[in-house]
Image (cartoon, rainbow, N blue to C red):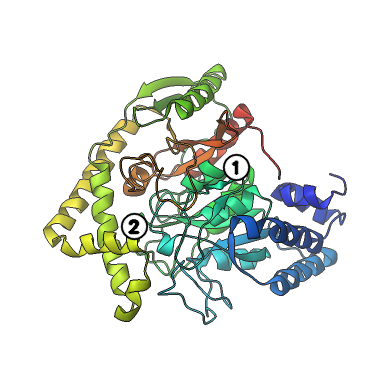
Amino acid sequence: MTLSSPRDLIYASVDELYRLYQSKQVSPVDVARATLDAVDRWNPLVNAYCYLDRALTLHEAAQSEARWMAGTARGPLDGIPYGVKDLLLVRGLPTGYGSSAARITDAAQDDAPAVARMREAGAVLVGKTTTSEFGWKGTADSPLTGVTRNIWDFSLTSGGSSGGAATALAAGMGTLQIGTDGGGSTRIPASFCGVTGMKATFGGVPAWPAGPLLTLSNVGPMARSVADLKRLLDVMMQADPRDWNSVPLPRHVRPSADTLQGLRIGLHLDQQCSPEVRVIIQAAADKLQEQGAHIVLTELPLTGAKELITAHWEAGTAWLVNQVAAEQRPLVDKGLRQVASKGETNSLSDYYQALIGRQMLGEAMLRHFAQFDLVLTPTVPILPFEAGRDAPANAASQNWLDWNPYTYPFNLTRQPAISLPAGVSASGLPVGLQMVAGLYQDEWLVDLAQRVEDCLQVRRLRF
């Protein structure tokens, strides 16, 4: 790869930047400056980053440059710009949580595990990205930071709750992003913004402090390509002794997915899917079948899943809001307070029944997946809707779970799931394809996602 323009640099892949750094054609400082220029251009319009420290970014880039010049680079992520969702701790920076009531203005004393691994790898922090308050809903709007918009169309939502991360990726404001996912929060905005987001098998990516939804909460990688996401995931999956739930995932559970030939793939397309999204997902499945995959229409055992996630969500938010000082609670997002108030009235028996129901759903999903190597769904069954809303204006319900039926079931079952671009609508908006594999098949799933990405060849828009 030859010397690139700033525009090329902000959209270069991890491997392209690695080769440029290694050959000394480009410095991490060049990339950091180009990235900050993109932030200056786009962030005022889309509100992707809520905390920036230009001096810190350039300082870390200069340190990386010195390592590359001395031949002591720490690996392929040394000098790669990245952002961190503002639910996670970054040593030396405040933590906002998207909350006017609970934000912590004092600098954090510790890094979250994923951030610690990125710091060790020599990556360059751009800033902290926007989220809904405590990540409670499927957009990235919050009382603290306001509305986050979609770079494809400023009048539309980015999705969420890792919406700032997805918008930043699409706009070239960072090569990699660290998000969180308690019900689809990496995958929803990945679909709406035309990037890639993943939730690994629960416990595979260490998280500390634990998320308020406990075993539903995941820290997840986000990137513009599956290859970049894989680089990030390899770093994020390294063990951290602070996470009580951390389980080192077994490697090579099944041979690397070098081809689609002969794979038996279930395709779940139900009546909740809008006609335009259905056409794009079906076309993607047809392309996979042309490459030798055997596509089988299936119906996932999702009956009751919404009630299960609701019971967990209400209990978690009730606990969370109770951690906020009583005098500050009126500042909490009204929708979040309403969910929490429902959780306050649920009985211990109701909650335990939800735990039993989750166990049964997981077992049913395991039996269903035994028929397939992989299952495909739309990531989200609709196109991005108006920014500043929790749901489309014409929707029967403003509950984000009603327009997002396909991501949260796999938080309940703990399975690895990844969203990648499947195509673009007639109006030029991205549509995501969700790929779901069996427990602990993360490595295989990511390898297969690269094959699928190569097959689909979705056009990537640069801004």
x then y, percent, for residue 70: 84, 67
State which tag comes first along the sequence, 1 or 2: 2
Category of crowding for the residue at label 1, using alpha-carbon neighbours closer than 10 angstroms: few (below 14), some (14–19), many (at least 20): many
Q: Amino acid at mark 2?
A: Thr
Q: Amino acid at mark 1?
A: Val
x then y, percent, for residue 99: 44, 69
Residue at 51% x, 26% y is 280
Residue at 32% x, 80% y is 327
Q: Quadrant of residue 346?
A: bottom left
Helix, strand or loop for disc 2? helix
Report whether residue 256 is seen.
Answer: no
Asked if residue 463 lies left or right of residue 326, the reply is right
Q: Is residue 366 above or below residue 62?
A: above
Tell me the residue that label 2 is attached to.
215
Q: Is residue 425 above or below residue 345?
A: above
Residue at 44% x, 66% y is 143
x then y, percent, for residue 335: 33, 59
In which quadrant is the C terminus drawn? top right
Mark on residue 58? Answer: none
Category of crowding for the residue at label 2, using alpha-carbon neighbours closer than 10 angstroms: few (below 14), some (14–19), many (at least 20): some
Mark on residue 226? Answer: 1
